[in-house]
Amino acid sequence: MRALVTGITGFVGQYLKKELKNQGVEVFGTSRKANPRKTTYQLDLLDKEKIIRLLKEIKPTHIFHLAGMSNVRESWSYVSKTIEINTIGTAKLLEAIKEVDQCIRLITIGSSEEYGKVYDIKKKISEETHLNPANPYGLSKAAIGMMIKQHHNVYGLDVIHIRPFNHIGPGQRLGFVTSDFAYQIALMNKGKIHRNEIKVGNLEAIRDFTDVRDIVKAYYMVALNGMAGEVYNVCSGEGTKIQEVLKMLLSFSDKEIIVKIDKEKMRPSEVPYFVGDYSKLKQLTNWEPTLPIQQSLQCIYNNWLNRLA
Ligand code: GDD
């Protein structure tokens, strides 16, 4: 495998690069910003001619398309930009593949947010669950999934769409729940701020969390064994209330911390429940998540403590 990873300098990109290298894969990567050390290629996904030039130069056998806007809350403030970067950006990549080499295997990264509001919460969300995105981010990813299917059906392109549920781990930037909570708790425990109050958003939502180190293993296995034109969920199959995530992170604190709900952190529309079914992926690859959420949260908290040292 000769892999090209778009968005390689991002949170998931860094972990995927490590996993692929461990597997002996030759890895190339793109990032939005120019890299002074020239270890990655600078790429604006809306520049189709540049994508074409890159594909001709790198000659990848596989592309993991990670680049894009990933923050659900921010997608409400940048609706057209979210659609442009995520959906149009992927369309340009598909056009470039069609032109340069139709044998390249493209893995696109969607999201559980494509399912949006599901009505039967007694059942775990499978790949067959109706898509009903509830925010611009979910919509931008659902459109990618549909585009992938069309390009497989019509042109026979070797494309696969993955729908990961929430993924967490050390190094995730602020703006995602476990980092937002762990950062504030670490700040207080390091004595960097002199208030003992954590600001949080909606604690009632239920999410399906998987450690990023397990997630990237699934991406690699799908790239090796997945069926072209198919969609695969990547998740833990376990639902955790955000309140519970907060409780676990607060248990690492030496200080007594008061919880304050911050209206600013609430969203215009919130999906109350995401719990996925990964049996299709398991059947294909034997993949299963290995890291329990408590362990991931401890790593995330320790990472913030070290970064604040
Ligand atoms: N970010 C954040 N910060 N979320 C909070 C906070 C807070 O202080 N307090 C409560 N929440 C709640 C959110 O309202 C949401 O219900 C839940 O915690 C998770 O929020 P995020 O971590 O921001 O993730 P997300 O579920 O919106 O989206 C993530 O998961 C998707 C897959 O389900 C992202 O990683 C997406 O890129 C990914 O596709």
Image (tube, rainbow, N blue to C red):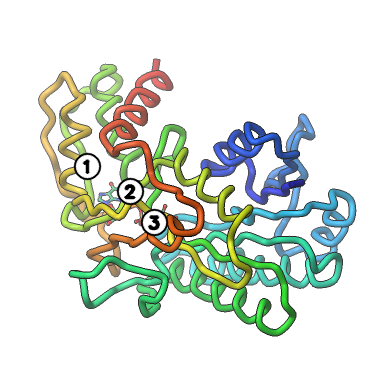
Question: Looking at the image, do the residues carrying marks 2 and 3 touch, with CB atoms under 8 Å apart?
Answer: yes
Q: Disc 3 on helix, strand or loop?
A: loop
Q: CA distance from mark 1 to mark 2?
A: 10 Å
What is the crowding at mark 2: few (fewer than 14 residues within 10 Å), some, or many (at least 20)? many
Q: Position of residue 87 (x, y in %)?
A: 59, 70
Q: Amino acid at mark 1?
A: Val
* Residue at (58, 41) in percent of width and height: 16
Q: Which residue is mark 3?
A: 165
Q: CA distance from mark 2 to mark 3?
A: 7 Å
Q: Amino acid at mark 3?
A: Phe
Q: Which residue is mark 2?
A: 209
First reached walking from the N terminus: tag 1 or tag 2: 2
Q: Is residue 187 left or right of residue 66?
A: left
Question: Looking at the image, do the residues carrying marks 1 and 3 touch, with CB atoms under 8 Å apart?
Answer: no
Q: Is residue 264 left or right of residue 218?
A: left
Q: Amino acid at mark 2?
A: Phe
Q: CA distance from mark 1 to mark 3?
A: 16 Å
Question: Looking at the image, do the residues carrying marks 1 and 2 touch, with CB atoms under 8 Å apart?
Answer: yes
Q: Quadrant of residue 18?
A: top right
